[in-house]
Amino acid sequence: MEKIVSYCRRIDEDLSRCGRDPQVFRNDHLFQDACCMCIVQIGELVSQLSDEIKAEAPAVPWRVIKDTRNFYVHAYGAIDIPSVWETLNRDIPALRLSCETLLQKQ
C-alpha cells in the first residue's frame, strides 16, 4: 500500500513540476511516459493486494485500476491522452487518499 501511495505522490510531483498544464502534458512525451509508467506500477501493485485489504475500501475501483494497467501495457499506442490527464487529476488523488486512509487503520 505504501508503494501505491508513493507512485501517487510521484504523479503529483510530476504534475506540479509541469504547472498542472494539460497542454504541457499533451506536448511532452516524457511527461506522458513517466505518468503512464506510474499508473502501470500502481495497477501491478493493486493486483497484488489481498481481497481483505480491497474489501476495506469497496468504493475504490480496484478491478478498473488493474484493467487500466493491462490496457496501458498491451495497447500503449491507443492510449487517449485526455483520458490519462483526467485519471491523473481526478482518480489518482482519490486513490491516494483512500490508500492513506487504509494505511492509517493498520
Image (cartoon, helix red, strand yellow):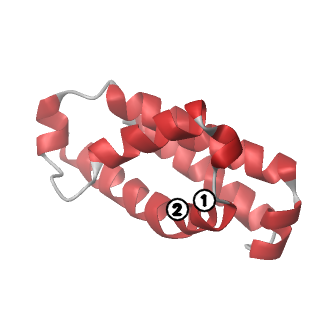
Whether residue 3 is visible, yes or no, is no
Q: Residue 26: x and y, percent?
A: 80, 65
Neighbourhood count class around disc 2 (C-alpha, 10 Å): few under 14, some 14–19, many 20 upward: some
Residue at (56%, 69%) from the top-left corner? 86
Which residue is label 1 attached to? Answer: 84
Q: Residue 6: x and y, percent?
A: 53, 42
- The answer to whether marks 1 and 2 mark residues whose Cβ atoms lie closer than 8 Å is yes
- The quadrant the C terminus occupies is top left
Which residue is label 2 attached to? Answer: 87
Q: Distance of mark 1 from mark 2, alpha carbons?
A: 5 Å
Residue at (18%, 51%) from the top-left corner? 57
Q: Residue 59: x and y, percent?
A: 20, 59
Neighbourhood count class around disc 1 (C-alpha, 10 Å): few under 14, some 14–19, many 20 upward: some
Q: Amino acid at mark 1?
A: Val
In the displayed structure image, the side of residue 97 where residue 73 appears, left or right: right
Q: Amino acid at mark 2?
A: Thr
- Residue 52's quadrant in the figure? top left
Q: Residue 38: x and y, percent?
A: 60, 41
